[in-house]
Amino acid sequence: MRIANVSFGCSFCSGVVFVAGFLCASAGFASDKKTEAHLLQHGSQKIVEPLVPQISYQGDANSLSFLMLGDYGEGNADQKSVAALLEKVCQLANPSAIFGLGDNIYPKGVRSADDSQWKAKFEDIYSAACTKSKPWIAVLGNHDYVGNPGGEVDYARKNKQWVMPARTYVVHYGPLLDIFAADSNVESKCAAPDCGFGELQKQATVSSAAWKIVLAHHPLFSVGEHKEPPNGLAEKLIPLYCAAKMDFFFVGHDHNLQHNQGKFLNSSCEINEFVVGGGGAQLYPVEPAPGITRFAQKEFGFALVKFEKTTATFSYYSVKNGMQPVYTVVVKKP
Ligand SMILES: [Fe+2]
Ligand SMILES: [Zn+2]
């Protein structure tokens, strides 16, 4: 199905343009050409979601930083502790955006864009000046799918901080970085027959960005509670990652902090995976895998990544260790 016009409000897009069907002006997003979309049924409600839209931010060509965390939307004291440290690191690093790696609202997602949980488990928690001012580039987790995942896409039209123009989408940050935001809930009812992976792969293989990353919720490899990926995810994600020569795979789902690197599930390339699941939900223990796990801790926390032309620096922060990173790795472009 094709639709001619998809509109989004956009007060968060100074320096932002929508491409491939979307242009961003101060008055809002307006499509300038036909955009793929899917008609979805949510109970008795029918809504239209665009399929793999692209957003462009005018990113710095030399240096870009991002914070990221997953598994956070509990509204509990642990989420608040992580949020307090997130704000401190945000002020120090001044990231371009924050990646929300799924399980955005526990335990059953939201009913709609107007659900009161948005205030209790997101807006009131990340209300400090720095974190509140940053776009929150989010993907869907399994808990988000228990409720109405389309409600999270709708919320992006209501709260301009929340970036989720569809369940699967692409974000361009100038020549330095392309972000491929995937819906890894492949066992649930995704917004497209293949959850948008085919289109993501098409866009990824033509990307000329210096760094290319995948955001999703489910790990391919994990040394915590969730050792196995959902059925069918590896078949979709490994070709996307390897064919497009991705640099990093950022996920949540396992409630801890992990860095795993290797050929997972017979992948044709080495996958550099960071599990950032310490956002506030109850933690799971880790058992590091020799030769693959570079770091693993059962701690509440988040990550900061800084992309420069030839190096990327990734650091984990934990609530226990405060402003001193518990792990840092520098990756150089060959
Ligand atoms: Fe989770
Ligand atoms: Zn999860």
Image (tube, rainbow, N blue to C red):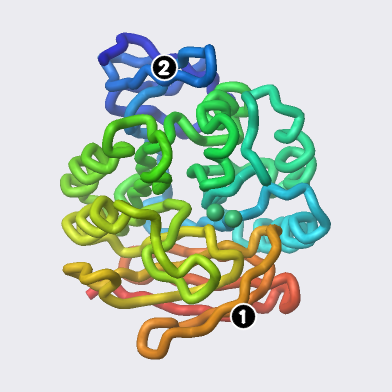
- For residue 285, above or below residue 248: below
Res. 27 visible in picture: no
Q: Which residue is pictured at 74% across the width and 35% down the height? A: 117
| Nearer to me, 52 or 134 | 52
Going by the numbered disc 1, the residue's amino acid type is Val
Image-quarter location of ligand 1: bottom right
Residue 50 placement, left or right of 236: right
Q: Which residue is pictured at 52% across the width and 79% down the height? A: 328
Res. 333 visible in picture: yes
Q: Which residue is pictured at 48% across the width and 76% down the height? A: 223
Q: Quick one: label 1, few (<14), some, or many (20+) residues within 10 Å?
A: some
Q: Which residue is pictured at 52% across the width and 36% down the height? A: 163
Mark found first going from the N terminus, 2 or 1: 2
Q: Residue furthest top?
A: 4
Quadrant holding the C terminus: bottom left
| Nearer to me, 112 or 214 | 112
Provide residue 168's location: percent of width, then percent of height: 38, 38
Provide residue 156's location: percent of width, then percent of height: 56, 28
Quadrant holding the N terminus: top left
- For residue 131, above or below residue 49: below
Residue hosting label 1: 326
Residue hosting label 2: 48
Q: Nearer the viewer, mark 2 or mark 1?
A: 2
Tell me the quarter of the picture where residue 235 sits: bottom left
- For residue 85, above or below residue 199: below
Q: Residue furthest bottom?
A: 290
- For residue 249, above or below residue 186: below
Tell me the quarter of the picture where residue 41 sits: top left
Dot 1 falls on a residue whose secondary structure is loop
